Amino acid sequence: QVQLMESGGGLVQAGGSLKLSCVVASESTFNLMIMSWYRQAPGKQREMVATVTSGGWTVIADSVRGRFAISRDNAKKAVFLQMNSLKPEDTAVYYCHTKFGPSNYWGQGTQVTVSS
């Protein structure tokens, strides 16, 4: 069983920054997990924002490349999303995700609201 717990969302003005955190509770080895951040805006499909592999290789969505960065701390079993130069279109619920074995695991989500 894997549990993901996000934190760090909130309200910020355009151009500001936020850092999201996701702590993983799991009996499995966190080091082996591919971790991702997704987001879902009202009326839109959930989309992948950033992914980090067990080896630290990252994939960043075109819409946030150059502004967002994903990182992980294996000792803390945590993954982070640093969001800079935020835009109103970044407003969404942000979810932490991992796929381990045959199962997908999601956190409860954290709301990010960017005001213009």
Image: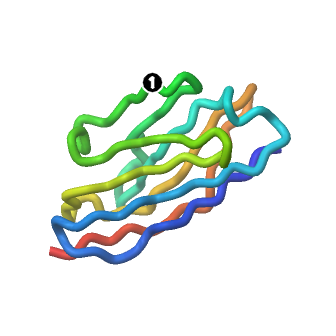
Quarter-of-image position of residue 41: bottom left
Residue at image position (40%, 74%) is 10
Where is residue 64 drawn, in percent x and y?
25, 44
Residue 43 relative to residue 102: left or right: left
48 relative to 41, above or below: above
Residue at image position (76%, 32%) is 29
The residue that label 1 is drawn on is 57
Where is residue 54 drawn, in percent x and y?
58, 26
The residue type indicated by label 1 comes to Trp
Between 61 and 46, the residue placed more toward the observer is: 61
Residue at image position (24%, 39%) is 65
Residue 114 relative to residue 23: left or right: left
62 relative to 47, above or below: above
Q: Residues within 10 Å of mark 1 (few under 14, many from 20)?
A: few
Between 91 and 79, the residue placed more toward the observer is: 79
Where is residue 12 drawn, in percent x and y?
28, 74
Between 107 and 70, the residue placed more toward the observer is: 70
Quarter-of-image position of residue 93: bottom left
Residue at image position (17%, 69%) is 14
Where is residue 82 drawn, in percent x and y?
37, 53
22 relative to 49, above or below: below
Which part of the image, by quadrant, shows the N terminus?
Answer: top right
91 relative to 98, above or below: below
Which part of the image, by quadrant, shows the C terminus?
Answer: bottom left
Instruction: Tell me the SS state at disc 1.
Output: loop
Quarter-of-image position of residue 105: top right
Residue 27 relative to residue 8: left or right: right
